[in-house]
Amino acid sequence: MVATEKGLSLIEVLVAMVVLSLGLLGLERVHIAAIQANSIASRLTQATTLAQDRAEQLMALPYNDAALADTTAPGTFTTYTDPNPPQGYTITWKVDEPSAGIKTINIDVTWKNKASQLKTFSLSVQKPSI
């Protein structure tokens, strides 16, 4: 062999492949974490949308509608539950009339995450009698 020839030996190529493989394996962990974060964000976005939709529905109802009735003393909330929520979610709203002419409505959307822990998104709106 001539000493001026240039190239890579088989061992150098194998070492380079091992280093590249380890780097790609590390990137795969980042990819899995990104997928999990995307799933969590998707569930939260869905819960936010459900709460906003329910708020709009309740705000469109007349002030004295049965779904907005406060049957308890001021400072205590009357709780209602959606009988047909989307699969995997529970939607409840609580109504209080702390003073005449205005109702406070607290909307909670609850779901379970992958670890079966309950997560909740809450939204509060006020409905005037006008």
Image (spheres, helix red, strand yellow):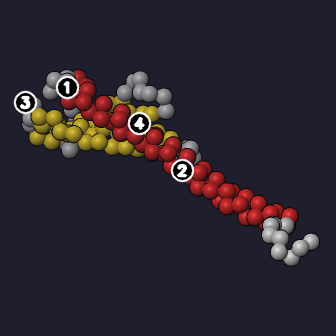
The span from disc 4 to disc 1 (Cα, nearest Å) is 21 Å
Q: Nearer the viewer, mark 4 or mark 2?
A: 2
Q: Viewer-nearest of labels 1 and 2?
A: 2
Q: What residue is shown with label 3?
A: 130
Residue 16, can we see it?
yes
Label 3: few (<14), some or many (≥20) within 10 Å? few
Residue under the image location 40 percent in, 40 percent down: 45
Q: Residue at label 4?
A: 46
Q: Is residue 18 visible?
A: no
- Marks 4 and 2, the one that precedes in the sequence: 2
Q: CA distance from mark 2 to mark 3?
A: 47 Å
- Specify which label sits upstream in the sequence, 4 or 3: 4
Amino acid on which disc 2 is placed: Ala
Q: In this figure, which residue is indicated by the disc labeled 2?
A: 34
Measured as percent of width and height from the top left, residue 25 is found at 69, 57
Q: Are the residues tagged 4 and 1 within 8 Å (C-beta)? A: no
